[in-house]
Amino acid sequence: MRDKADYARKGIARGRSVVVLQYEDGILFVAPNPSRALHKISEIYDKIGFAAVGRYNEFEELRLGGIRYADINGYTYDRSDVTGRGLANLYASNLGRIFTESIKSLEVEVVVAEVGDTPDGDAIYRLTFDGSVFDEHGFTVMGGQAEAVSGRLKERYREAMPLADALEVALVALTEPGGERPPVAQLEVAVLDRNREHRKFQRLTGARLERILPAAPPPSPTTTTEPDDAPTGPPTGPDGDIDDGSSPL
Amino acid sequence: MASHRDLPAGLVDRFFVNSGSSSFTEFVSSHAPELLPVRGEILATPIGDQVPHATTIVAATFAGGVVMAGDRRATSGNMISQRDVQKVFRTDDYSVMGIAGTASTGIEMARLYRVELEHYEKMEGRTLSVNGKANRLATMIRGNLGMAMQGLVVVPLFAAYDPDKDEGRIFSYDVAGGPYERERFDAIGSGSIFARGSLKKLYRDGAGADDTVMTLIQALYDAADDDSATGGPDVTRKIWPLVSVIDANGFRRLTDEEVSGYVEQMLEARLISPDGPIAPLR
């Protein structure tokens, strides 16, 4: 059991961090992601968003399952009966079962976020590979150097920040001190905006994202040139860790 | 709150199994068919006359988009069963559908269709093409054919903004499916004959959204004028037609205030000329 947990933890720490935080109009998701097609952040339902780190094929399966669950519940009952808590419970029971029953646990960590009509109604649930659920307040970080990123985020996070500030705070947290910021083209950003009609989830890409970004102050001047360790050219995955067969399982 | 424990037993295990299909209806019908409307039933007697019917829906394209409007009346036989029924539905950010025929079946179908479109979009990370959406609706109508033969007829009108062509498109259907793409405008329901006649004379190529909304309000009035099952604007109760506009910015339903503006303008003109605007003869 402990081996399984260690293995999963290592797998999750290999990738890059994902940040989910509250801002004045809802919830912001930020993930450095070199791939444009393989998403780490996704819409589940009207008010519910999903973010994940770890092995792509594993969290993709969770994402699709979550969409099926949400759409079936919303169709059977009413759209307002689909809640983030219900989805988090479903994921928790599924993750927990796989952790105890199968040889290999899932190497994923997942956030289910739900935007409410007011900031008090917002909810961020973080689920780990063993099915534990954490009800997060304000912000959460998962994957990669989660603790370091979380520390930087905690220093700067304030309640009810405007979108541009929240994005800036997230990017500062995701950037190692003295490191380079991920370029806009390698950022996956989305919001659950409570002011939108019908579906609250919206991806911020291209021009829309750049319009928000320059409003923020420039990165810290102590930028040193580091050896560029970004993969050159294709292939790209949602995480840098392409399975090289060295895994024992 | 609905939880996964309230769903049929065994269904939850299926959520995480890749079925290879991005269709909501297909997933539900193979794993929990009891959640879908039953289509194979044989009714003892046709009940077509006893359930409320929705009536007239009109749609017309304009430069860069499409407008759909519907009256608010539902009738059962010679009774008015509801004065403020809704029969124009947003199906996703760039499409809308109106229903004529059995109101309950139509509303149910619109709800399922919306889930179907969104489900595909979320699963695949892309929206269906406009043709894909229109075909999908045809399959659903075809699935209702058995019930239609027993009186529960539903015929939708579908309109969508096509981002590839930057224009609005309209598709109509019959009881067995379709779709039939329509140029410029179309109408369905009991008042459609009159509405279409009116649209023929009032439709202007290249008109803006504003003029096109007015054209549709006029057409609905003409339909209500001659068809007893179509409701005109209810001035005393302030019940106005439902009007939805779709263009590059997405779906927008006009507010009651906006629609009442158009209606009052039209009614004022009709006080002088009761048959509405007169089209030039030559």
Image: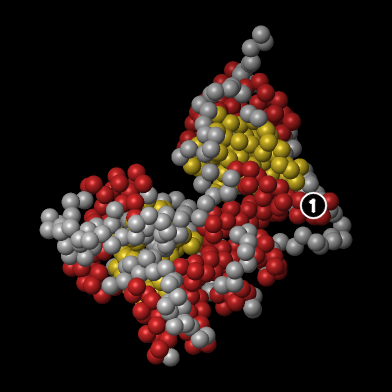
Question: Does B212 appear above or below B249?
Answer: above
Question: B69 and B121: which one is in front?
Answer: B121
x, y (%) of residue B107?
Answer: 65, 52
Q: Pointer 1: residues within 10 angstroms few (<14), some, or many (20+)?
A: many
Q: Residue drawn 33% across and 67% down?
A: A16
Q: Quadrant of residue A85?
A: bottom left
At label 1, the amino acid type is Leu
Question: A178 and B279: which one is in front?
Answer: A178
x, y (%) of residue A132?
Answer: 41, 81
Q: Residue drawn 41% across and 59% down?
A: A236
The residue at which mark 1 appears reads as B145
Question: Does A143 appear above or below A236?
Answer: below
- Count of numbered marks: 1
Which chain is indicated by disc 1? B
Residue B11 appears in the rendering = yes
The secondary structure type at the circle numbered 1 is helix
Q: Residue drawn 48% across and 35% down?
A: B258
Question: Does B259 appear above or below A147?
Answer: above
Quadrant assignment for the C terminus of chain B = top right
x, y (%) of residue B210?
Answer: 50, 28
Left or right, B64 with respect to B192, comes to left
Question: A180 and B208: which one is in front?
Answer: A180
